[in-house]
């Protein structure tokens, strides 16, 4: 493993698993398609997302991969515990009504409407479909 650089790691190269027996078990179990293709798959996935590729840092035998969070995954505003509770309900039951959420959380329907408005305005959820037959989708 010594002699690697970030550049040579990204080039085509043979793979020498640190523990061939473990690698073989994972391969036979279907967790690995082939060795030596992982870094290329990571690069391809980032290209498909149209985002910046991770940074590869090599120190002796250690290879570190530094991932940058996608902008869509970053939460810039702090959300309250109640908003988190509402998000959890909507994840499990996207078509839940304000009344159902209010009953579950023991709060008023008006409070639910206000909290959902905050979540919507923050860009965390969006309404899909009509008001009566639609559902909430987390962004």
Image (cartoon, rainbow, N blue to C red):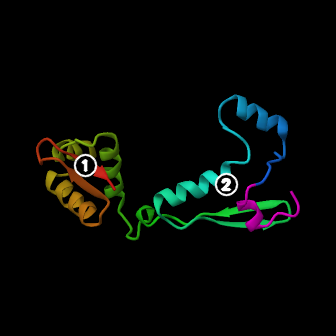
Q: Residues within 10 Å of mark 1 (few under 14, many from 20)?
A: many
Q: Quadrant of residue 101?
A: top left
The spot of residue 43 in percent (x, y) is: 60, 58
Q: In the rendered image of this protein, does residue 122 appear above or below residue 116?
A: below
Is tag 1's residue or tag 2's residue first in the polypeptide sequence?
A: 2
Q: In the rendered image of this protein, does residue 106 appear above or below residue 84?
A: above
Q: Quadrant of residue 56?
A: bottom right
Q: CA distance from mark 1 to mark 2?
A: 36 Å
Residue pictured at 88% horizontal, 61% vertical = 2
Rendered image: mark on residue 51: none
Most extreme residue toward the bottom is 76
Residue pictured at 20% horizontal, 41% vertical = 100
Highlighted magenta segment, given as a residue range = 1-12
Residue pictured at 21% horizontal, 52% vertical = 127
The spot of residue 21 in percent (x, y) is: 83, 35
Look at mark 2 in the image and give the residue it sits on.
39
Look at mark 1 in the image and give the residue it sits on.
136
Asked if the residue at tag 2 contacts the one at tag 1, i.e. Cβ–Cβ closer than 8 Å, the answer is no
Q: Is residue 98 left or right of residue 69?
A: left
118 or 42, nearer to the observer: 42
Q: Residues within 10 Å of mark 2 (few under 14, many from 20)?
A: some
The spot of residue 103 in percent (x, y) is: 21, 43
């Amino acid at each position: 493993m010594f002699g690697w650089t970030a550049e040579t790691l990204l080039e085509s190269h043979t793979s020498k698993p640190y523990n061939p027996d473990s690698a073989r078990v994972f391969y036979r179990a279907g967790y690995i398609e082939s060795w030596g293709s992982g870094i290329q798959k990571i690069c391809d996935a980032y290209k498909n997302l149209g985002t910046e590729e991770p940074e590869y840092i090599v120190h002796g035998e250690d290879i570190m991969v530094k991932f940058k969070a996608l902008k869509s995954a970053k939460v810039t505003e702090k959300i309250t515990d109640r908003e988190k509770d509402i998000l959890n309900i909507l994840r499990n039951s996207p078509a839940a009504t304000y009344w159902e959420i209010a009953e579950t959380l023991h709060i008023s329907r008006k409070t639910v409407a206000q909290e959902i408005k905050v979540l919507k305005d923050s860009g965390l959820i969006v309404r899909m479909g009509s008001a009566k037959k639609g559902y909430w989708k987390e962004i």
